[in-house]
């Protein structure tokens, strides 16, 4: 069956340091960006120009750092404003710390306030956005700042992405309510020996990840993101090693999933 949509992995690394592997960013079809990490830098101008909506899971730099350059690159060449969606905390952080006329211009006033090149839209946990036949639902997860996971439903498939999270409950409640689930993307930033750091930074390590997967009621493909480059080999071996209770794949930039 012809699938309705694609999710392209632009970046899924926990940081920089592996050439070709940028930080978190997924492109849904040609027009929707989910997070704006350094992975966005892989796109040529024409594809940057086609982006209409940018959904940010949270305010951390590795998920927003390409946004200022994206707006600057395509802003005045687009017919309408680039729409940036996030929690109130995320939008306020962008206004205060990035688009503050010091680090970068306030593009909500460029070229003027009536027809700006950037627009903010506050979303909450529970918000549903229907963009064509693509339904995006946002659910809070557990991180050091307010953060969201994403559920995508198209006429032909479903995809869920945890964003950055520690152990969490509500997200799985919503994921399990989907009629089915094709792909589940979850993070594992640290190896098990750094569980203390995962607990502190509110990320997952393989041991915690496998506990989280026990909450998932759907049979589906599981893919892992956000491995820190300095411990990539160790985390990867733990995800695939003897303690692994689920089969999973490790995401890589350039992969395309048909949803
Ligand atoms: Zn984060
Ligand atoms: Zn992150």
Image (cartoon, rainbow, N blue to C red):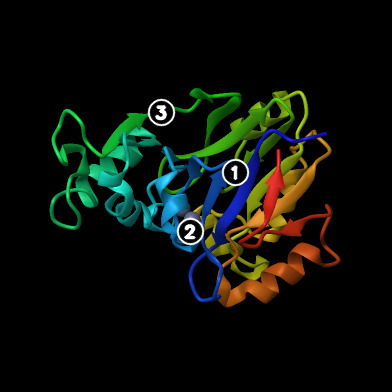
Corner quadrant of residue 229: bottom right
Query: How many neighbours does mark 3 have within 10 angstroms: few (below 14), some (14-19), or many (20 or more)?
Result: many
Along the line of sight, the residue nearer the viewer: 174 or 91: 91
| Label 3 secondary element | loop
Q: Which mark is residue 115?
A: none
Q: Which residue is mark 1?
A: 162
Labels 2 & 3 near each other (Cβ < 8 A):
no
- Can the viewer see residue 212? no
Along the line of sight, the residue nearer the viewer: 242 or 195: 242
Residue at image coords 35%, 51% = 67
Residue at image coords 17%, 28% = 114
Is 63 left, or right, of 181 in this rendering? left
Is 224 left, or right, of 249 in this rendering? left
Residue 250 percent location from the top left of the image: 71, 61
Residue at image coords 39%, 35% = 85
Query: How many neighbours does mark 1 have within 10 angstroms: few (below 14), some (14-19), or many (20 or more)?
Result: many
**C-alpha separation, residue under disc 1 versus residue under disc 2:** 24 Å
**C-alpha separation, residue under disc 3 versus residue under disc 1:** 17 Å
| Label 1 secondary element | loop
User: Which badge, 3 or 1, comes first in the chain's sequence?
Assistant: 3
- Can the viewer see residue 150? yes
Q: Which residue is mark 2?
A: 43
Along the line of sight, the residue nearer the viewer: 164 or 17: 17
Q: Which mark is residue 123?
A: 3
């Amino acid at each position: 069956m012809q699938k309705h949509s694609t999710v392209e992995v632009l970046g899924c690394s926990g940081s920089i340091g592996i050439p070709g592997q940028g930080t978190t960013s997924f492109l849904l079809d040609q027009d929707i960006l989910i997070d704006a990490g350094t992975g966005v830098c892989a796109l040529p101008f024409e594809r940057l120009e086609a982006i209409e909506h940018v959904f940010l899971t949270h305010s951390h730099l590795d998920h927003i750092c390409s946004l200022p350059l994206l707006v600057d690159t395509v802003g005045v060449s687009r017919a309408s404003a680039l729409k940036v969606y996030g929690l109130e905390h995320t939008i306020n952080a962008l206004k205060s710390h990035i688009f503050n006329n010091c680090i970068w211009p306030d593009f909500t006033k460029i070229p003027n306030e009536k027809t700006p090149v950037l627009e903010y839209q506050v979303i909450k946990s529970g918000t549903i956005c229907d963009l064509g036949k693509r339904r995006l639902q946002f659910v809070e997860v557990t991180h050091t700042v307010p953060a969201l996971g994403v559920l995508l439903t198209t006429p032909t498939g479903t995809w869920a992405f945890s964003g950055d999270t520690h152990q969490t409950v509500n997200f799985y409640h919503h994921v399990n309510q989907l009629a089915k689930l094709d792909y589940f993307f979850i993070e594992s930033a640290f190896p098990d020996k750094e569980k203390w750091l995962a607990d502190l930074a509110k990320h997952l390590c393989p041991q915690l990840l496998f506990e989280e997967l026990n909450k998932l009621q759907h049979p589906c493909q599981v893919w892992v993101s956000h491995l820190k480059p300095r411990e990539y080999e160790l985390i990867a071996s733990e995800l695939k090693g003897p303690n692994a209770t689920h089969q999973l794949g490790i995401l890589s930039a350039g992969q395309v999933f048909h949803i």
